[in-house]
Image (tube, helix red, strand yellow):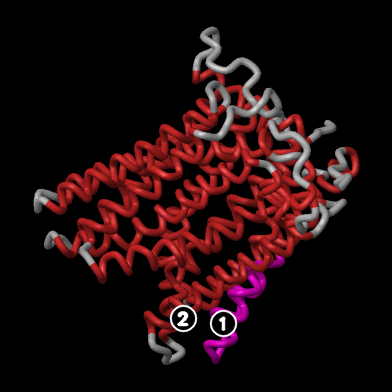
């Protein structure tokens, strides 16, 4: 499917922009610059929320149980709307969905800033705000993923997904939390929520001033009244189940999330503590290096052409990237654990860049919102189960065997998926070579 720059709403780029390095080529178009700015601001707002809500809970005299309810409420809102968000993204203007989602997040965060300043904030309000934020993200992410191919030429999709892979850890794990901490230190938690409202309002503004993309990548029959949301969702499931490369990859993804999220989130702090290191600081350093690995892997992949054997390369990088997790249960030195996490983050994030590009290149535009939301839903559903199972598993067998399973199982399932779903034949029959 040939694509020209004019297909995405921009005329020929300026000569200076045409010479941009491959990882930065998506920024040649005005539409992508605005859309990427909206994503960056939204990610920063989410990172700020993670810090601000903790200190606001403390400021109103609440405790861990209330904070747990708030976090759970946000997750429930997200999971409950992820599939619906994909249906809506395939029926309505994706740009308007993003504007509405970011506006809702701005209003919700702003309400916390106002009531906290007036000493009227309650844990119940924070729970409701968390639900709103989760619901907004359930609509935002499918719409964003489905909108990218409308504003970026096909040959630049790998770079666009690499940019997202860089922005996510940088803003959610570093810049956003840092900005919130600074506002709380200088002013009060309420000002951090004012900052959150501000960045989401800016995200909505960036998307609002972005011209509506052309026909490429838009729903075939947006808002068609003769189809129900249920029938649209059923069609999305039918497409997934009859597409072998999607079945094989999502089966692998369920295994990956199920066996790795719990060990990293729950067991890693205790493994670091057993090294005799300063627990919180060492854990923060380990996670930071994991994120830096993700940034490195995303940048590297976005600078390279899409692999010819893209399905095999993606699954083997994802599976092989988990092998260093075996070190976490057996290492005698903290630096070895940090190096293993960096390598894991680099390989798995690089594979994630291929995955995002693969969805945008091979899934029909009118189906992309639903398939993106199904992918999102699978990951969201498996992560809580992983964290629930890892504690009993570690108590029964110890941490070392659990980390070993986390290291070996993904690569094993990746090899099986490649063979059983006949992905090597599929990637030959459906080449995604880049022409520029």
Q: Secondary structure at mark 1?
A: helix
Farthest residue in the left direction?
119
Q: Residue placed at 64% from the left, 39% from the top?
A: 148
Image-quadrant location for residue 260: bottom right
Taking the spot 35% from the left edge, 59% from the top edge, the residue there is 50
Residue 286's place in the image compared with 306, above or below, is below
Relative image position of residue 410 (x, y in whole percent): 66, 61
Q: Residue at x 38, y 43 (%)?
A: 201
Residue 263 counted in the magenta span:
no
On the rendered structure, is 324 left or right of 173?
right
Q: Is 330 in the magenta?
A: yes
Task: Tell me which corner region of the image, top left, top right, bottom left or bottom right, holds residue 421.
Answer: top right
Using the rendered view, name the quadrant where residue 155 is placed: top right
In the foreground, 432 or 211: 211
Count residues near mark 2 (Cα–Cα under 10 Å), then give few for <14, some for 14-19, many for 20+: many
Please rate how many residues cluster around mark 1, counting C-alpha atoms within 10 Å: few if below 14, some from 14 to 19, many from 20. Answer: many
Range drawn in magenta: 320-346
The disc at residue 143 is none
261 displayed left or right of 176: right
Most extreme residue toward the front, as rendered? Answer: 15
Distance (Cα) linking label 1 and label 2: 9 Å
In the image, 104 versus 398, the foreground residue is 104
Q: Position of residue 236 (x, y in %)?
A: 61, 27
Q: Are marks 1 and 2 in contact (CB under 8 Å)?
A: yes
Q: Classify mark 2: helix, strand or loop.
A: helix
View extreme (top): residue: 226
Residue that numbered label 1 is attached to: 337
Say which quadrant the N terminus sits in: top right
Residue 271 numbered mark, or none: 2
């Amino acid at each position: 499917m040939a694509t020209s720059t004019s297909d995405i709403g921009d005329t020929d780029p300026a000569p200076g922009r045409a010479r941009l390095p491959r990882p930065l080529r998506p920024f040649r178009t005005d539409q992508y610059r605005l859309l990427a700015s909206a994503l960056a601001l939204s990610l920063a707002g989410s990172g700020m929320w993670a810090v601000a809500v903790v200190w606001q809970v403390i400021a109103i005299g609440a405790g861990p149980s209330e904070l747990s309810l708030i976090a759970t409420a946000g997750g429930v809102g997200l999971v409950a709307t992820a599939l619906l968000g994909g249906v809506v993204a395939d029926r309505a203007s994706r740009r308007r969905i993003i504007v509405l989602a970011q506006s809702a997040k701005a209003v919700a965060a702003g309400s916390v800033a106002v009531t906290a300043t007036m000493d009227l904030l309650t844990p119940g309000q924070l729970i409701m705000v968390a639900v709103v934020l989760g619901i907004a993200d359930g609509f935002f992410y499918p719409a964003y993923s489905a909108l990218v191919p409308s504003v970026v030429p096909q040959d630049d999709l790998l770079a666009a997904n690499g940019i997202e892979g860089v922005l996510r850890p940088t803003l959610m794990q570093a810049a956003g939390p840092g900005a919130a901490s600074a506002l709380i230190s200088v002013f009060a938690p309420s000002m951090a929520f004012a900052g959150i409202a501000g960045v989401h309002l800016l995200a909505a503004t960036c998307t609002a001033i972005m011209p509506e993309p052309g026909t490429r990548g838009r729903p075939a029959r947006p808002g068609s009244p003769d189809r129900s949301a249920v029938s649209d969702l059923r069609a999305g499931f039918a497409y997934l189940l009859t597409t072998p490369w999607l079945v094989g990859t999502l089966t692998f993804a369920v295994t990956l999330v199920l066996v790795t999220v719990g060990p990293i989130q729950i067991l890693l702090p205790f493994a670091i503590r057993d090294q005799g290191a300063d627990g919180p600081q060492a854990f923060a350093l380990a996670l930071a290096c994991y994120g830096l690995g993700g940034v490195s892997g995303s940048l590297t992949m976005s600078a390279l052409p899409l692999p010819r054997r893209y399905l095999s390369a993606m699954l083997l990088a994802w599976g092989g990237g988990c092998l260093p997790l075996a070190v976490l249960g057996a290492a005698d030195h903290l630096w070895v654990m940090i190096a293993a996490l960096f390598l894991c983050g680099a390989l798995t994030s690089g594979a994630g860049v291929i995955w995002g590009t693969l969805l945008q290149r091979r899934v029909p535009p009118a189906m992309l919102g639903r398939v993106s939301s199904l992918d999102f839903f699978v990951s969201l559903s498996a992560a809580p189960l992983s964290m629930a199972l890892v504690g009993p598993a570690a108590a029964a067998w110890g941490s070392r065997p659990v980390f070993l399973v986390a290291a070996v199982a993904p690569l094993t399932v990746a090899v099986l998926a490649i063979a059983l779903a006949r992905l090597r034949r599929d990637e030959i029959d459906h080449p995604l070579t880049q022409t520029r």
